Image (cartoon, rainbow, N blue to C red):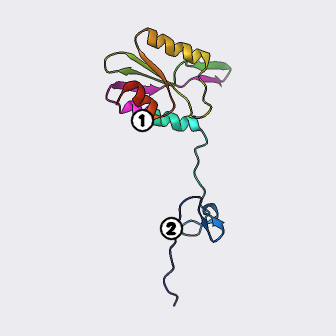
Amino acid sequence: MAGPVPILLVGAGQQVEGLSMEALPDLFGLEPIKPRHHTKPEAAALAEVLRALSTHQSVAWVRRMNSGAAKVGNRFIRFGWPGCPDLLGQMKDGRLLGVEVKRAKGGRVSDEQRHFLALIKQAGGMAFVARDCRDVFKELGR
């Protein structure tokens, strides 16, 4: 009868006897462990910013605005409008909230987006670009 099997715990990316974690089998030995990477950094930023806004004490509500276009049958349907922020909402004091979300590296704000955020600010609303929850806390306060 064989003795107990030694257990070795390692973190992602560490080497075990020349093998990377990606090459090790799962707990039952059925399939290799594959590292999880978010393929869309802006989607991850959007989820983080949306969560920070939806739980912030000064925000009444916030929703994701989908924009783009699609062909349905013979019709071309546009969603949203050029420059529409990713997130629209309302502050508890009644002001409009517009937030354009960009990924941390390389996310650029278009002229239309910049113009629309300026329109919101000129009308007394709250508008800004956020790359993560820190930008939300900076703009809205803790």
Q: Position of residue 15 (x, y in %)?
A: 61, 65
Furthest-bottom residue in this view: 1
Neighbourhood count class around disc 2 (C-alpha, 10 Å): few under 14, some 14–19, many 20 upward: few
31 or 106: nearer the viewer: 106
Q: Point out the stretch of residues depicted in magenta.
A: 50-73
**How many numbered markers are drawn?**
2
- Quadrant of the snapshot with the C terminus: top left
59 on left or right of 114: left
The circle on residue 9 is 2
State the image quarter where residue 14 is shown. Answer: bottom right
Q: Position of residue 4 (x, y in %)?
A: 48, 83
**Type of the residue with mark 2:** Leu
Query: Residue sitting at 58 percent across and 44 percent down?
Result: 38
Query: Residue sitting at 49 percent across and 10 percent down?
Result: 119
Q: Earlier in the sequence, mark 2 or mark 1?
A: 2
90 on left or right of 31: left
Q: Is residue 96 visible?
A: yes
Q: Nearer the viewer, mark 2 or mark 1?
A: 2
Q: Is residue 89 above or below residue 33?
A: above
142 or 5: nearer the viewer: 142
Element at label 1: helix
125 or 66: nearer the viewer: 125
**Type of the residue with mark 1:** Arg
Q: Position of residue 110 (x, y in %)?
A: 61, 20
Check if residue 57 falls in the magenta segment: yes
Q: Cα distance, mark 2 to mark 1?
A: 33 Å
Query: Residue sitting at 35 percent across and 25 percent down?
Result: 59
Q: Which residue is mark 1?
A: 51
